[in-house]
Amino acid sequence: MAAITIYLKPVCPYCDRAKLLLKQKNVTWTEFNIAADPAKRTEMLEKSGGRTTVPQIFIGGTHVGGCDDLYALDREGKLDALLSKAA
């Protein structure tokens, strides 16, 4: 299973929706609260090419983007393949 990282903020409905989909896929992830850790916010900005919205989701070495991007991948049938790639 590929390593999954989610940068998020508390009380974020988009973050909750993204995590719900990943939970339905029976995968685990590491999450970083960028509101509580400014260094993680900087890391997120660097890794995402300056995107400031949350969540920012990374699967393996792939920057998926946000919640809508994650659901779009699932609708297109591409999310499962990405999740199954080796880390």
Image (spheres, grey):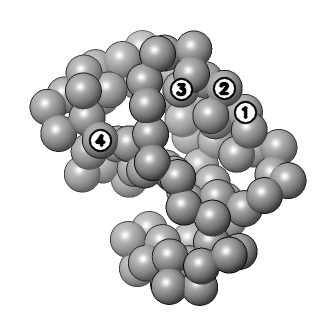
Amino acid carrying label 2: it is Leu
CB under 8 Å between callouts 2 and 1? yes
Residue name at image x 59 percent, y 79 percent: 37
87 up-or-down from 63: above or below:
above
Gap in Å between the C-alphas at discs 1 and 4? 19 Å
Residue 29 picture quarter: top left
Which disc, if any, is residue 3?
4
60 up-or-down from 83: above or below:
below
8 up-or-down from 75: above or below:
below
Which residue lies most toward the front here?
36
Residue ID for mark 1:
17
Q: How crowded is mark 1: few (under 14 residues within 10 Å), some or many (20 or more)?
A: some
Gap in Å between the C-alphas at discs 4 and 2? 17 Å
| Residue 75 appearing in the image | no
Q: Where is residue 70 in the image (x, y as percent from the top left)?
A: 54, 35
CB under 8 Å between callouts 4 and 3? no
Q: Residues within 10 Å of mark 4 (few under 14, many from 20)?
A: some
CB under 8 Å between callouts 2 and 3? yes
Quadrant for the C terminus in the image: top left
The secondary structure type at the circle numbered 1 is helix
Q: Where is residue 59 in the image (x, y as percent from the top left)?
A: 34, 42
Which disc, if any, is residue 20?
2
In the image shown, does 45 or 75 lie closer to the viewer?
A: 45
Amino acid carrying label 3: it is Leu
In the image shown, does 84 or 11 lie closer to the viewer?
A: 11
In the image shown, does 84 or 40 lie closer to the viewer?
A: 40
9 up-or-down from 36: above or below:
above
Amino acid carrying label 1: it is Arg
Q: Where is residue 62 in the image (x, y as percent from the top left)?
A: 30, 49
The secondary structure type at the circle numbered 2 is helix
Residue ID for mark 3:
22
